[in-house]
Amino acid sequence: MRANSKAEFDHLLNSVEFAEFTRLLARLTGLRVTFHDLTDQRLTPQFQDSFVAPLCRLIHKNPVGAERCLTTDRENVRKAIRMRQKVSFTCHAGLIDILAPVFSEGHYLCIMSCGQFLPTPPSEEGLAAFCECTRDLALDPEAVRKAYYQMRYLPVEMMEAVGDLLMFFSAHIREVGRRIHLLEEQLGRDEIYAAKEYIEDHFREDITLGQVAEYVGFERTYFSRLFSAKAGMGFSEFLQRARVEEAKKLLGEDSGNVTKIAFQCGFRSFSQFSRVFRKLTKCTPSQYRKRTSKEKK
């Protein structure tokens, strides 16, 4: 997951909109909606275990059952992402789940899941069908019976409506993400320009990321991310390049002490200066001075 997508994902989990949406859907259907982050092709639940359907909790305690659930989830998550549409599917245990992908600025962000629930109203026949699907998992019969009758059932019409609601909310999330992105574009431009000017005026001093962030009125972590995105490089690299450019100018203008020049340009030591200079120019300060001296003749 990209860094920006991770930040958006975390924002969604804590948003008022998501809390209200899940509350209303739970009130209407008795089902929980959860977001899942797809990392290394694994679904990582972001919520407490009590949000998982009762029968699923029993299955997950068995390593074989847990792996079957994961395999089924992977296949259908990929399908939902590929189609960019909701996917309703029956898992290996005969339970139903609904998935809806969320995209932001064209990038996959996360999956919304609403399940699992029973394919038919609770009955002894349905319980027997579940037991047959999971027979080799050796689940406790009494625990299974209790969990089975705690499961929710959705008629087909309601299942379709839930899927449509998930996609509607997904579209809302995309629009919110687009607006936030545009707002960041508008708000960040002037501040980053001011930050660059500040660095170019003060690079000879021992300035820090926090100082520059405070100067332009941004929180440190947010400013660091925004600066990297707008400037095409991190704060440290931009600062180093400003110092090296000044050092190149001084090296070409006079024959003063190289160490003195290093400190004049804001470097804390000659070794740091030499290392950074070589990294950015592919030559040592002395080699650069000799080269520019020859070019002048």
Image (cartoon, rainbow, N blue to C red):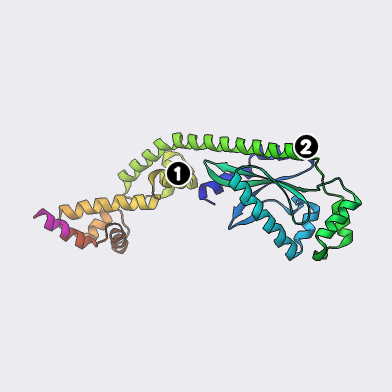
Is 241 left, or right, of 295 in this rendering? right
* Tag shown at residue 226: 1
Name the residue located 26 percent from the left edge and 51 percent from the top edge.
245
Q: Give the residue number, with chain letter if any, for mark 2.
A: 157
* Tag shown at residue 209: none
Q: Residue furthest left?
A: 297
Please tell me which of labels 1 and 2 falls first in the chain.
Answer: 2
Numbered range of the magenta stretch: 291-296
Is 203 left, or right, of 143 in this rendering? left
Vertically, is 81 above or below 169? below
Q: Nearer the viewer, residue 287 or 140?
A: 140
Q: Residues within 10 Å of mark 1 (few under 14, many from 20)?
A: many
- Circle 1 sits in a helix, a strand or a loop, which is it? helix
Give the x, y percent position of residue 157: 77, 37
Residue 59 visible in rendering: yes
Q: Nearer the viewer, residue 208 or 245?
A: 245
Q: Residue furthest right?
A: 124
**Residue 189 falls in image quadrant:** top left
Q: Is residue 292 magenta?
A: yes
Tell me whether circle 1 and circle 2 mark residues in contact (CB < 8 Å).
Answer: no
Give the spatial CA distance, label 1 vs label 2. 45 Å
Is 166 left, or right, of 212 in this rendering? right
